[in-house]
Image: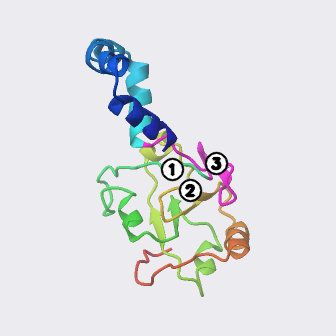
């Protein structure tokens, strides 16, 4: 927000120097700068906010594969060899806390859900999942905003249970959005 405010002030400020920069310098300099791949990547990540993470936040725990608690859930497009949905972001439209397993759920995870309204999604393992940084059979607890709250490579039901209990979760989860664990 502070960066956006500062850029807006510069772009809209009045005065001869601001007008010169806006009308003469920026139109010449910006196209040259955007020829640099590193700058284009940086600008994309900044504007799209895909670089935003909550690592170090009290809701963020664990690491499984290259995905840490607090990271945005990696997007996976399914290769069409299964009857699954086209990608793993479709369940996120429910805006619920939810569990994702990429591969096979380990013992205890399905039973954990008893007595909780916690949508769960099991996605058959595909090679693209490892490339995206996910770990096979790990448990990922996903926040309503699409960020990973807990990434557990051991898929420990007791660790997931302790995480949920310590935070009184899930909060506001709605029934009817479940896809069987």
Q: Nearer the viewer, residue 132 or 40?
A: 40
Q: Is residue 72 above or below residue 106?
A: above
Q: Is residue 81 above or below residue 30?
A: below
Q: Point out which mark residue 46 bears.
A: none
Q: Position of residue 69 (x, y in %)?
A: 62, 53
Q: What's drawn in magenta, residue-wise? A: 49-69
Q: How is the image coloured?
A: rainbow
Marked residue nearer the N-terminal end (1 or 3)? 3
Q: Quadrant of residue 84?
A: bottom left
User: Alpha-carbon distance for marks 1 and 2?
Assistant: 6 Å
Q: Is residue 47 above or below residue 28?
A: below
Most common SS among magenta residues: loop
Question: What element does badge 1 sit on?
Answer: loop
User: Alpha-carbon distance for marks 1 and 3?
Assistant: 10 Å
Q: Is residue 56 magenta?
A: yes
Task: List the residue tagged with mark 3.
Answer: 55
Q: Position of residue 161 (x, y in %)?
A: 69, 73
Q: Position of residue 24 (x, y in %)?
A: 27, 13
Question: What element does badge 2 sit on?
Answer: strand
Task: List the residue tagged with mark 2.
Answer: 148
User: Alpha-carbon distance for marks 3 and 2?
Assistant: 9 Å
Q: Is residue 137 visible?
A: no
Marked residue nearer the N-terminal end (1 or 2)? 1
Q: Are marks 1 and 2 in contact (CB under 8 Å)?
A: yes
């Amino acid at each position: 927000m502070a960066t956006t405010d500062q850029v807006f002030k510069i772009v809209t400020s009045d005065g001869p120097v601001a007008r010169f920069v806006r009308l003469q310098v920026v139109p010449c300099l910006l196209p040259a700068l955007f020829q640099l791949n590193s700058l284009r990547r940086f600008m994309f990540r900044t504007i799209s906010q895909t670089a935003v993470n909550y690592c170090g936040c009290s809701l963020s725990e664990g690491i499984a594969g290259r995905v840490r608690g607090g990271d945005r859930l990696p997007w996976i497009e399914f290769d069409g060899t299964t009857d699954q949905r086209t990608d793993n972001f479709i369940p996120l439209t429910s805006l619920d806390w939810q569990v994702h397993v990429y591969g096979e759920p380990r013992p205890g995870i399905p039973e954990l859900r008893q007595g909780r309204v916690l949508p769960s999604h099991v996605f058959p393992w595909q090679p693209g999942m490892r490339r995206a940084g996910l770990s096979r059979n790990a448990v990922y607890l996903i926040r309503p905003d699409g960020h990973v709250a807990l990434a557990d490579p051991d898929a420990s039901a007791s660790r997931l249970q302790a995480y949920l209990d310590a935070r009184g979760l899930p909060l506001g989860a709605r029934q009817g959005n479940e896809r069987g664990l």
